[in-house]
Amino acid sequence: MEKLESLSTQEKEQLIHYLGKLYRKGSVHEAFMKQGMVEDHPVQENDMEITALLRLILRQMNREYAMIILNDFFEVKERGWWHSIYSRSSYNRCKKEAVDLLLNRLYTAQ
């Protein structure tokens, strides 16, 4: 936990961006498997397990925070999607809290 606390906001966001790549990759593999288009492969199964864990954590989070993680990192919506919902300061505060919460929950989920 100390290691997470020592990271800068930018470093934490880089971690979440990486998790977003894994999330999207696992989602694609999952969709292909449902359609019978891909054979089981250990790497793909790991990606899908990570995606499932991230979805579980998102479901347990405050909806507002989960929306920020999904829109900014996992599903990557258009820039500025938040303008009609938040002021810049509220958005930045909520985004920082969402990133911290996701990383803390992921760290303690082991």
Image: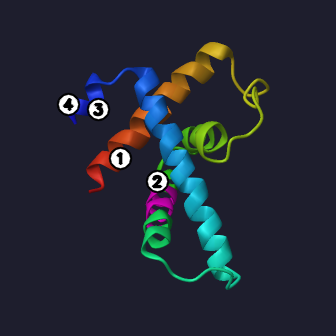
Residue that numbered label 2 is attached to = 60
Going by the numbered disc 2, the residue's amino acid type is Gln
Hey, which quadrant is residue 69 in on the image? top right
4 and 3 marks in contact (CB < 8 Å): yes
| Marks 4/3: CA–CA distance | 5 Å
| Marks 4/2: CA–CA distance | 23 Å
Going by the numbered disc 3, the residue's amino acid type is Leu
4 and 1 marks in contact (CB < 8 Å): no
Mark number displayed over residue 105: 1
Check disc 2 and report its element: helix, strand or loop.
Answer: helix
Residue that numbered label 4 is attached to = 2
Going by the numbered disc 4, the residue's amino acid type is Glu
Left or right: 6 in relation to 69: left
Mark 1 surroundings: few (<14), some (14-19) or many (≥20) residues within 10 A:
some
The residues colored magenta run: 49-57
| Marks 3/1: CA–CA distance | 11 Å
Residue 16, how many percent across, how many down?
A: 48, 39
